[in-house]
Image (cartoon, rainbow, N blue to C red):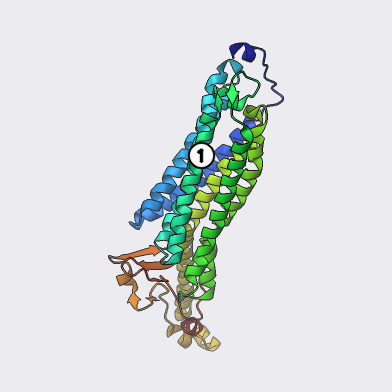
Amino acid sequence: MSTQLENLKSNPAEDNGPLMSTATWCLVGVSGAFLIVRLIIQKSQRRLWLDDLLLGLSWTLLLVQVILNQLAINLVNLSNFNTMIYYGASELTISIIAITLSKISFGVTLLRLTSGWTRYYVCFAITTLAVFAIPAATVPWTQCKPIAKTFLDILPGTCVDKRPSVRYGNFQAIWSALMDVSLALLPWKILWNVQMRTAEKIGVGLAMSLGVFAGAVAIVRAHYIEKLAVLDTSYDSYTSIIWASAEAAMAIVATSIPVLRVVLKGVVNTAIEGYNTSGRSKSRTNPSQALSSGGWKHSSNRPTDLSVTLCGDESLMKSHGKGYLELDDLIVDEDTGRVSAATPVSMTEAKEQKVPQWPL
């Protein structure tokens, strides 16, 4: 094999390394920022759970994948080809695991919100994602002897037919996309019977359905997996590597946004409440102006506390107690499995108050 490698020459004009490096590091940076904010929020509210652990592990593996990719890019000399091959094989395996864990994390979140057939379906999705990922993760190590021939077909050695492996890779990516879309639609079924304002219901549903974008990226990755059947995988697989990183990053971001949305909503509502309170204070300092507009008396009788709301038959104080879990704007009773709105405002109450609120 060393003789074969000595006859090979690297063409600097045909180098996909800079593109891969820029794209993958940007993806790991953006997804890491979303994850860190999510974990800080969850820890501050003492709500860290298994889904946060899985999401953190997924991002850690994504970071390891990008580091291995960068190390392989830095080894520009073909005399280091064997080392590059092991970096590449490890990178492909780790990327599959990172992608799978990011999606299983959202499934684990849904397990706390579902019951009956929907819960069984979530378990089915989690199981199949894990099982179907195992062959895809082992292919780089089992397809050829020596392993280097997997990435450069002109090298001496033996390989099994690559076409079944490529077809299976396509199937695994498409199945991952289908599970993304189906799990992203489940929150709408959960929200259907929850009593909350329509605008908030739409906001929660959209925030918890962003996994469809990870599914779209998975379909694109499935298309580029075909590149892995070419003679020089070490050169032509860059698109597959970029889209694999993008899929894991997109899943991490999509799973983190529902937690960030609640905090952003609270900040906006607090700002609106502060603005309204400031307006009322100014009216009191100039009562003649307020009375002339006919609004001082009326506004002084309005309730101003936007944070005091009801949660079905239980108060928020009880909802935050033992046996309850808060997910986005939803409260889950761990004993009964009942899902209710954490901060619902009835349409009648909203009409009476006419207080601007965060719409989603």
233 versus 327 height, above or below:
above
Residue 74: x %, y % from top left: 57, 24
Find residue 328 and report its horizontal and vertical position in percent.
44, 63
Residue shown at the point (53%, 88%) measured from the top left: 294
Q: Is residue 219 above or below residue 276?
A: above
Q: Quadrant of the N terminus?
A: top right
The tally of labels here is: 1
Q: Which is more toward the observer, 16 or 353?
A: 16
Judging depth in this view, the residue of 272 and 138 nearest the camera is 138
Q: Residue furthest left?
A: 322
Residue 248 visible in the snapshot: yes
Callout 1, which amino acid? Answer: Pro
Q: Which residue is mark 1?
A: 135
Say if residue 359 shows up in the picture: no
Above/below status of 73 relative to 93: above
Looking at the image, residue 183 sits to the left or right of residue 326; the answer is: right
SS class, disc 1: helix
Q: Position of residue 147 (x, y in %)?
A: 54, 24
Residue 76 x, y percent position in the rendering: 60, 21
Q: Residues within 10 Å of mark 1 (few under 14, many from 20)?
A: some
Q: Residue drawn 29% across and 65% down?
A: 323
Identify which residue is drawn at 55% across, 86% down.
293
